[in-house]
Every structure is written in C-alpha cells, then in structure tokens.
Image (cartoon, helix red, strand yellow):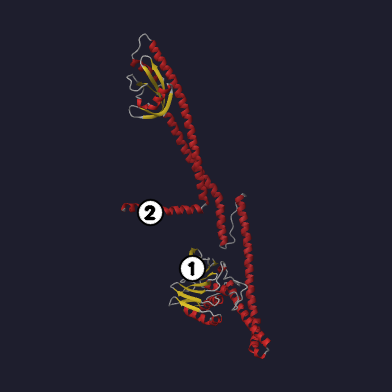
Amino acid sequence: MTTHLHVWHHITQSVQWAVPPFRWIKAKWRSSLLLRITAITLMASALVLTVLGFSLLSKVSTGLMDTKQQGSLSEATAGHVEAQRVIEAAGAAPTAPSPSRLVDEVVANLASRSGSHAQFDVLLLAAVPGQLLPERGTNLVSTASIGVDIREVIAATRAQSWVYGPIKYIDGTSVPGLIVGSPLRIQSLGEYTLYYLFPLTQEQQTLDLVRGSVLITGALLLILLTVIARIVTRLVVNPVRQAARTAALLAEGQLSERMPVRGEDELAQLATTFNDMAASLQQQIKQLEELSRVQQRFVADVSHELRTPLTTVRMAADLMFENRADFDPTTARAAELLQNQLDRFEELLTDLLEISRFDAGVASLDIDSWDLGELIKRTVEIAEPLALRTHTPVEITLVTDANMITADRRRIYRIVRNLVENAIEHSEGRKVVISVAVNDEAAGVTVRDFGVGLRPGEAALVFNRFWRADPARARTMGGTGLGLSIAFEDARLHGGWLEAWGEPGQGSCFRLSLPRIARSSFSESPLPLIPEGFIGVESSTSSGLVLDAVRQPPADAFRFGPRTGAL
C-alpha cells in the first residue's frame, strides 16, 4: 500500500510539473497566429512528405524485387537445364562417375555460372530429407536455409517454386534472399531438388540508400517549407500586428498614430483604409470634444447667468411668501407653489454648476479627518422628517467602533444624503438599513432598502444623469435627477467607487467604498455589496471587480470603478 501511494505521489508530481508548459503552449497557440500557421504548415507538410516517401519507397522496393525475381527465375531455369545436360552427359559416358562425383560435378558446373562475385549459391539436396544420398552446396551455405514449406510445395507440384527468406551459412551469418527450387531426377541416384539461393544484399543496400536519401531530402524540404511558411506568414501577420498596436494606441487616446504604408498590394490597401478610418475617427472625436466643451461651457455660462435673475426672483418670491397671509387664498397658494419651485430650481442650478466643475476637471477636495459614523447619524437625523412622512424605519449598524477617515466631509455627506433619501423614497414604507465599516485601508457604507428594487440592466443606468427607473412614477420628494451622478463623481474624486445592486421586489443596495485616506489605494471594500441570502460572483479584472448577483429570478448588479466609470 505504501509503495502504491509513493508511486501515485510521483505520478501526481510529474503531471503537476507538466501542466504549466502545456498551459503556456495552449496560451501561445491561442494568442499567436504566426505560431498556428507555421505549426499547421509543418504538420501538413510532414504528413504529405511521409505519404510521398512511403509511396516512393514502396515503388522502388517493388521495382527492385520484381527485377531481381525475374532475373533469378531465368537464371534458375537455365541452371536446371544445365544440370540436366550434365546428368545426361554423365549417363552417356562409357564409364559412369560415382554418385558423389556426379553430384560434385553438377554443383561445380552450376557454381561456375555464378561468376567471381558469387551472385548466387546452389544446393543440391535429396527430395526426401533423411535419404542416404550425397548432397552438395556452395560457399558454406547451410541446408537450414531451405524451409519445410518450399520443400512441400515442390514435392506436391513437381514444378519450380520460390520463396523469400533468410539465406543461412554454416558460420552462423545470414542475409535476406530469394530461394528458387525445382525438382531434378538423377537416373542412377533418385529424386533431388535443385535450389538456387540469390542474396538480396545489393537490393537491400540500394533500398537503404534510397530510404536515407528520402529521409534527408524530406527533412530538408520540411525545414525549408517551414521557414518559407514562417516568412510568408510574417509578411502577412506583421501588418495585422501593426494594425492591432495602432488600434490600441488609438484606444489609449493617441489619435495621431498611423500605420506605415508600403507598396500597393492588398496589405498596403488595408493600411491606407485603416489610416483613413483613424483620421475620420480623429476628426469626429475632435468635433465631439469641441461640442462637449461648448456644451459644458454653455451649461456653466447659463448657470452663472441665471444666478442674478434667480436672486432677484428669489427676493420677490420670499417677500410674497412671507406676506401670503395678506393675500386671497388663490394668490397665497400661488406664492407657496412659486416658493417650492424656486427651491427646486435653485437646487437644480447648484447641481448643474457642480456637474460643470466635474466636466471641466476643476473639482477639488477639502480634506480633513472626521468620524464617518457620526456623519451617518447626522445624515439620518436630517432625513428623519422624510422617513416619518413615508413611515419608513431607518436602522444604522456600525460594524466597527473606530470609523475615522480623512476625506472631504461636505462631499461624503452629499453622497450619503442622496443614497439615504433615494432609499427612503423607493422603500415603499419598508425599513432602510445603513451599515458602516472602516478597516486599515478602506471605508465602506451600504444603504439597503426592501422596496421596488432594480430590474435587470437598470443597475448599469442608475448613475446616469437625469435617469429614472420608471418615468411614470411620481417623485415624492422632488430632486433634480443629478444626485446619484454627482455622488458617483464625488466618490471617484476621492479615489473610491460607488456600486449598485438590485432585484425586482427584493429591494436594492448601494455601496460606497472609499480609501481611508482620500486618493490612496485600496484593494476591496470592508462591506459586501450583495446582501446575505443572495449569491454573488466576484471576478478580478484590470479595472476592478465586476459583481454579478444570482438568485431565482436572477439579480442584477453593477459596479462603477474609480477611473473608468461604468464597468
């Protein structure tokens, strides 16, 4: 058992060691077009060359064997005729030679036909093994070269037969060869079988030479094709890479970046078209930037210009409101309505001025140290009349005892006030829970209500200017439609973020996350965005965390980052 565990441990370690290179290769394969094309070309070329190589070797081998077989059969037939002539001549002689001498004479005569290079060997064996008949052979060739199969075929057919097999010698060596046998009758002795043994050494050497040449040529051709494919692919991929780099630089805001144009081919047309597109985008973006600047300047100018007439109207409205008791009921009611609408108009004007400061990039922080928990309590006290009017209970939970932070008190108060008032307005009389927590690097505030909630996709829109979830829904507390947008900008100005989560019929939750010291860095909020009982999935991205809420039915979550706005 211990041995099995030890072996399993080694296997596990080996697999773990092999996984990182595999992942690297997989990542490289997915990210590199040049690698994919080169590898595919290499594999396809290797497959084609392998098929062609096997086909060539097969044809060469078949041709050599056919030629060798035809020549060998012709030589064996001629040798059989020559042996028969020698036997007949010996029988016609006045004095018949002894059996051994006759067999020696036949073998010697046939061996002389082989020449000095010993193109073949000869065996003259009794047709039935074990008979006491003289047997002879050339060049120390062993009778073990003759297998049982060819003996049986010749004995059955009494005709010439051949087989490929090893030619064995008495010294123990062997070579591949072609063995041809034919029956031979010697009048004074009986039935013999004449075997011709043709070595295939030269043919084997020729095949080895051809095989080596094919392998070397195939390897060189494979390398050459791979290099050519890589060069050609690089010629195509480099402009694509250049286009990707240029597009990335354009996305970063370097609108003057362009692709180099070389030649007049399709790639040059691609570069020219890309540059034309970039120039058009640059022109349109500049026009949009100019329109945005004009719009921002217009909003700022209008807001400032409205200050003077608004002050005059405000003075007159205040005078009418203070003396409304002296007016008839209709005029008194008109004075009250005028006062209320002027309050809202003045609030809208203030928000527009604040938005214009954010757009112009001139908003600044007035930083000092203070207690976040006390600010929350003060904000709830100010919102108490609204909560009483809507019969909404408000709870505060201080998760941590020490809640000191360094930030702009006025802006944080404005964020919390907007979140609390929105929660009370949309809670439909159900309770609102405010949680506060501060750790070593960050502070967090969550405002949770149990009202109408947010439909899927609405969490991505709540911080847009003048956005309303239900345009037909009447406002219970006025508002300008810019509160959450300004709150988001205030959070971003501190280096923090504002997030929203909601689900229809289950309410919503807004989370404010701030660095404990304004504009310092922090990794995560001390409070969860998704309430307990819901399933949240957090995944790390280059811009921060993206939060998704999952339940039956699915919830909706959205996050606003400190630099990029909506993620």
Q: Which residue is mark 2?
A: 12
* CA–CA distance in space, label 2 to label 1: 37 Å
Determine the image quadrant of residue 299. Answer: bottom right
- Give the class, few, some or many, for how many residues have Cα within 10 Å of label 2's Cα (few <14, many ≥20): few
Q: Is residue 169 visible?
A: yes
Question: In the figure, is residue 179 to the left or right of 346?
Answer: left
The quarter of the rendered structure image containing the C terminus is: bottom right
| Residue pointed to by mark 1 | 534
- Amino acid type, label 1: Phe
Q: Position of residue 33 (x, y in %)?
A: 53, 51
Identify the amino acid type marked 2: Thr
Q: Nearer the viewer, residue 146 or 319?
A: 146
| 51 vs 112: above or below | below
Residue 371 visible here: no
Front-most of 249 and 420? 420
Secondary structure beneath label 1: loop
Q: Nearer the viewer, mark 2 or mark 1?
A: 1
Q: Position of residue 270 (x, y in %)?
A: 61, 53
How far across and down, in percent of the image, does residue 51 sit? Answer: 50, 39
Q: Earlier in the sequence, mark 2 or mark 1?
A: 2
Which quadrant holds residue 106?
Answer: top left
Helix, strand or loop status at disc 2? helix
